[in-house]
Image (tube, rainbow, N blue to C red):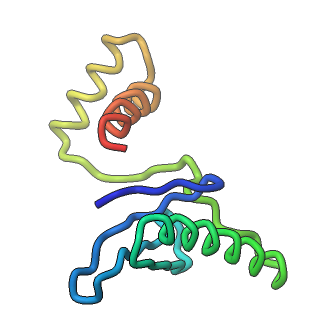
Amino acid sequence: MSVMTYKGYHARVEFEPNDGVFAGRLAGINDIITFESDNVKGLQEAFHEAVDDYLETCQKIGKDPQKPYSGKMMFRVAPEIHARAALAAELAGTSLNQWAEKVLDEAAKATV
């Protein structure tokens, strides 16, 4: 899997061997925006065109384009993990939110 970025939007790209094309989809939004090409240069052009078309279409119909993320995350973890994370945050002298943001940022930078 590869990731592409343009105008603050990200896309996940995979090779589809049955069709012999690279296929991509915008990530982080509910609207389904896809693109494809049989070569890397064409894939980048198709990605840019898909984002530009999405933004233009939203403007034409008076819809705010979805932003990739709001900054609000809500998820459940085991109570033991919650307790260890809260303790780690307190020992680091930060709030649990600040601690979790730092840890998630470091983990995401290692991946993206």
Q: In terms of image quadrants, where is residue 108?
A: top left
Question: The C terminus appears in which quarter of the rendering?
Answer: top left
Q: Pinpoint residue 31: horizontal percent, then vertical percent.
A: 56, 78
Tell me which residue sits at (35%, 16%) in the image: 90
Question: The N terminus appears in which quarter of the rendering?
Answer: bottom left
Tell me which residue sits at (54%, 78%) in the image: 33
Q: In terms of image quadrants, where is residue 49?
A: bottom right
Q: How many marks?
A: 0
Q: Pinpoint residue 109: horizontal percent, then vertical percent.
A: 37, 35
Q: Pinpoint residue 36: horizontal percent, then vertical percent.
A: 45, 79
In terms of depth relative to the viewer, which is nearer, 87 or 35? 35
Q: Pinpoint residue 85: horizontal percent, then vertical percent.
A: 27, 29
Tell me which residue sits at (43%, 33%) in the image: 101
Tell me which residue sits at (22%, 31%) in the image: 83
In terms of depth relative to the viewer, which is nearer, 65 or 54? 54
Compared to residue 61, the image places residue 66 above or below, namely above
In terms of depth relative to the viewer, which is nearer, 96 or 23? 23
Q: Is residue 87 left or right of residue 90?
A: left
Residue located farthest toward the left when viewing the structure as drawn: 80
Q: In terms of image quadrants, where is residue 12?
A: bottom left
Compared to residue 98, the image places residue 38 above or below, namely below
In terms of depth relative to the viewer, which is nearer, 16 or 76? 16
